[in-house]
């Protein structure tokens, strides 16, 4: 009896999606497009983003604007304390 070969057709190969980091400038651009009345689905197609990413940016628009206007570089949910004091 012969051994069966495993199929390596493209339909059986799984490719992992990689996360895309969205810069602060891109977030502000998305917010301004939404404020101008552009449809989220159009933004998704043009910028190659998922709908959930655009919705999250839209829902957090006020917070994003506040943080970026204060000159902070990231939207960190965790804070660290300086133990050297």
Image (cartoon, rainbow, N blue to C red):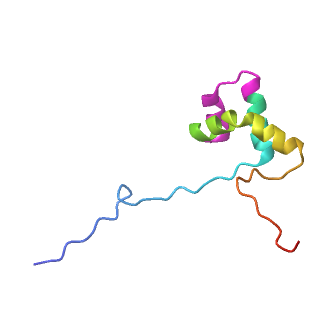
Give the x, y percent position of residue 82. 83, 68
Along the viewing direction, whichever of 68 and 45 lies nearer the viewer: 68
In the rendered structure, which segment of residues is drawn in magenta? Answer: 34-49
Task: Give the quadrant of residue 50.
Answer: top right
Q: How many marks?
A: 0
Q: Is residue 18 one of those drawn in magenta?
A: no
Up/down of 38 relative to 16, above or below? above
The secondary structure that most of the magenta stretch takes on is helix
Along the viewing direction, whichever of 34 and 11 lies nearer the viewer: 34
| Quarter containing the N terminus | bottom left
Horizontal side, residue 1 vs residue 62: left or right: left
Up/down of 32 relative to 48, above or below? above
Q: Which residue is found at the position 77% from the left and 63% from the top?
A: 80
Up/down of 66 relative to 20, above or below? above
**Direction front: furthest residue:** 85
Task: Give the quadrant of residue 39.
Answer: top right
Along the viewing direction, whichever of 74 and 77 lies nearer the viewer: 77
Give the x, y percent position of residue 66. 83, 39
Q: Which residue is found at the position 58% from the left and 39% from the top?
A: 52
Give the x, y percent position of residue 74. 78, 52
Q: Which residue is found at the position 29% from the left and 65% from the top?
A: 7
Horizontal side, residue 22 vs residue 69: left or right: left
| Quarter containing the C terminus | bottom right
């Amino acid at each position: 009896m012969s051994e069966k070969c495993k199929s390596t057709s493209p339909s059986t190969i799984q490719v992992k999606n990689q996360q895309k980091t969205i810069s602060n400038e891109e977030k502000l651009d998305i917010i301004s497009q939404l404020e101008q009345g552009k449809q989220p689905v159009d933004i998704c197609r043009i910028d190659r983003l998922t709908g959930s990413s655009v919705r999250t940016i839209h829902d957090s628009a006020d917070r994003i604007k506040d943080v970026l206007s204060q000159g902070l570089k990231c939207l960190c949910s965790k804070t660290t304390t300086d133990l050297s004091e």
